[in-house]
Image (spheres, rainbow, N blue to C red):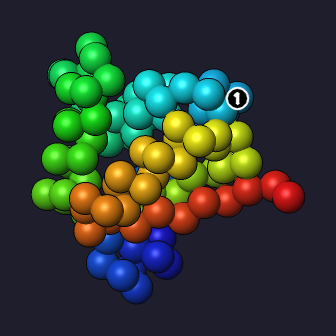
């Protein structure tokens, strides 16, 4: 709530899991679910477009808990979000 008030962004929370290590579609579906996107998630490309569009038109602070599970594919998704949208990402991870 404090982040939301200070920065004026809605905050959403996503919990990463083991499936995020080597899979692009798993974190993408987690983003879509957190953003209440139900249509257009059949393919990775369509889901990616829906997530990017939502985060571009309605910027959020995306808090990713258990981010130590994020592998290369998930990090590429996070990089895409940061490059294509005004949304911000906060990653919480165990060392």
Q: In the image, 32: left or right of 52?
A: right
Give the quarter of the image for residue 87: bottom left
Instruction: Work out whether residue 14 can be spotted.
Output: no
The image position of residue 12, as x and y in percent, is 43, 53
Q: In the image, 47: left or right of 67?
A: left
Q: Residue furthest right?
A: 95
Which residue is labeled 1 in the image? 18
The residue sitting at 66% across, 49% down in the picture is: 67
Q: Is residue 93 above or below residue 34?
A: below
Q: Residue furthest top?
A: 42
Q: Nearer the viewer, residue 29 or 49?
A: 49
Q: Residue furthest bottom?
A: 6
Q: Is residue 25 above or below residue 57?
A: above
The residue sitting at 34% across, 34% down in the picture is: 32
The image position of residue 15, as x and y in percent, is 60, 41
Query: How many numbered marks, from 0 up?
Result: 1
Callout 1 crowding tier (Cα within 10 Å): few <14, some 14–19, many ≥20 = some
The image position of residue 77, as x and y in percent, is 43, 45
Q: In the image, 37: left or right of 62?
A: left
Q: Nearer the viewer, residue 70 or 60?
A: 70
Give the quarter of the image for residue 51: top left
The residue sitting at 24% across, 47% down in the picture is: 52
The image position of residue 13, as x and y in percent, is 50, 50
The residue sitting at 85% across, 58% down in the picture is: 95
Instruction: Work out whether residue 6 can be spotted.
Output: yes
Q: Nearer the viewer, residue 26 or 64?
A: 26
> Secondary structure beneath disc 1?
helix
Give the quarter of the image for residue 60: bottom left
Q: Nearer the viewer, residue 12 or 71?
A: 71
């Amino acid at each position: 709530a404090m982040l939301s008030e200070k920065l004026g962004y809605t905050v959403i929370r996503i919990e990463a899991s083991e499936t995020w290590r080597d899979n692009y579609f798993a974190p993408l579906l987690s983003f879509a679910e957190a953003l209440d996107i139900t249509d257009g998630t059949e393919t990775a490309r369509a889901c990616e477009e829906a997530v990017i569009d939502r985060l571009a038109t309605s910027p959020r602070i995306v808090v990713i808990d258990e981010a130590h599970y994020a592998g290369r594919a998930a990090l590429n998704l996070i990089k895409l979000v940061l490059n294509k949208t005004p949304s911000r990402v906060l990653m919480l991870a165990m060392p």
